[in-house]
Amino acid sequence: MAENVTPRVRAPREAAPGDVVSIRTLISHPMESGQRRDGDGNIIPRSIINRFTCDFNGENVIDVTLEPAISTNPYFQFDAVVNESGTFQFTWYDDDGSVYEETADIAVA
């Protein structure tokens, strides 16, 4: 498991029915490719976020597969249409089997 991994999400708390909302996510993660060596010459094990998903009320909004060339601290910004109040569920999957999750609620009035 990578150390000091912190997911962050910015999503509006309120919207009107049918609004397109902008969502921004960032996860603090070192994204080690498995090709670098430490000070003693040992290979640093690969540890990257290899998949990111976002669901809204159980329905998939975005599903991204990431490759080793992605930079440290992956950032995503995307739009979603909201027709009802609910919860966005954000999930990041690490090579080592770790799963990082965050949620954001939105009220539609």
Image (tube, helix red, strand yellow):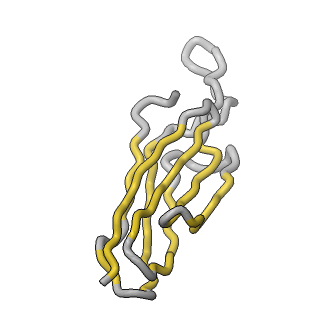
Q: Nearer the viewer, residue 95 or 38?
A: 95
Point 49% across, 80% down: residue = 81
Q: Position of residue 76 (x, y in %)?
A: 51, 62
Q: Which of 16 and 12 is in front in this view?
A: 16
Locate the C terminus and report the quarter of the image it occupies: bottom left
Left or right side of 88 for 13: left
Q: Where is residue 100 in the image (x, y as percent from the top left)?
A: 48, 42
Point 61% across, 39% down: residue = 48
| Quarter of the rendering containing residue 68 | top right
Left or right side of 40 for 82: left
In the image, residue 47 sits, relative to residue 102, either above or below, namely above
Point 53% across, 39% down: residue = 99
Point 57% across, 56% down: residue = 53
| Quarter of the rendering containing residue 33 | top right
Q: Position of residue 80 (x, y in %)?
A: 50, 76
Q: Which of 69 and 48 is in front in this view?
A: 48
Q: Nearer the viewer, residue 9 or 44?
A: 9
| Quarter of the rendering containing residue 64 | bottom right
